[in-house]
Amino acid sequence: MEWLDRLPTLNALLNLTSACLLVAGYAFIRRRRIAQHRLCMLGALGASTLFLVGYLTYHAHHGTTRFTGEGAVRAVYFTILFTHTVLAAVVAPMALVTVFLAFRERFDRHRRLARWTLPVWLYVSVTGVVIYLFLYVWYPAQASS
């Protein structure tokens, strides 16, 4: 399916979008531009949610994508993949609680949690792009003939 083959690229773009919106949202809140901060963070949440839908759809139809790199690069890739996967599972509820606290105007608790949520979420978004590059650009699987 052609649309299925495009999902990894779309997912990488969604991760990149999320990372950019997180950085912009952080910059806005540092300048006390709350409305812009809110829009960026909700946009990052939306991009990450769309990523998750695309990721689950792709892997439900395609299965696992094997990493073809050899040597030391395998250790690098699997270290990034392991930390990305563990932190992705952790950051999803963290992000939801952080947003929930903001909507409830519990800003002291929101700020305390956001100090942890932002770097973890940013790491997960950026490493999602890096994993895409490893699997589909730098070390793509050879097409079988």
Image: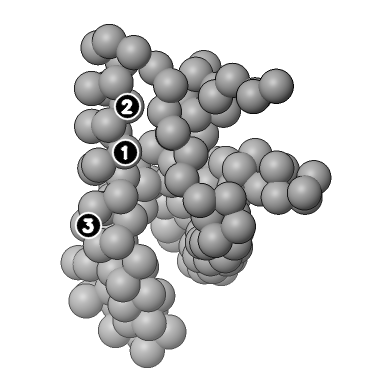
Identify which amino acid the numbered label 3 is placed on: Trp
Residue contact between numbered discs 1 and 2, judged by CB atoms under 8 Å? yes
Q: Position of residue 127 (x, y in %)?
A: 39, 37
Disc 3 target residue = 116
| Residue at image point 53% right, 46% down | 15
Observer-nearest of 117 and 85: 85
For the image, the number of numbered tags is 3
Q: Which mark is residue 81?
A: 1
Q: Which mark is residue 77?
A: 2
Query: In this rendering, would 45 be left or right of 121?
Result: right
> Image quadrant of residue 32?
bottom left
Query: In this rendering, would 45 be left or right of 108?
Result: right
- Which sits earlier in the primary sequence, circle 1 or circle 3? 1
| Residue at image point 39% right, 17% down | 69
Q: Which mark is residue 108?
A: none
What element does badge 3 sit on? Answer: helix
What element does badge 1 sit on? Answer: helix
Separation of marks 1 and 3 at Cα, in angstroms: 20 Å
| Residue at image point 49% right, 29% down | 135
Task: Answer whether residue 75 is visible to the viewer in this image.
Answer: yes
| Residue at image point 43% right, 21% down | 68
Observer-nearest of 92 and 139: 139
Camera-side mark, 3 or 2: 2
Identify which amino acid the numbered label 1 is placed on: Leu
Residue contact between numbered discs 3 and 2, judged by CB atoms under 8 Å? no
> Mark 3 Cα within 10 Å, few/some/many (few <14, many 20+)?
some
In the image, residue 117 sits, relative to residue 140, either above or below, namely below
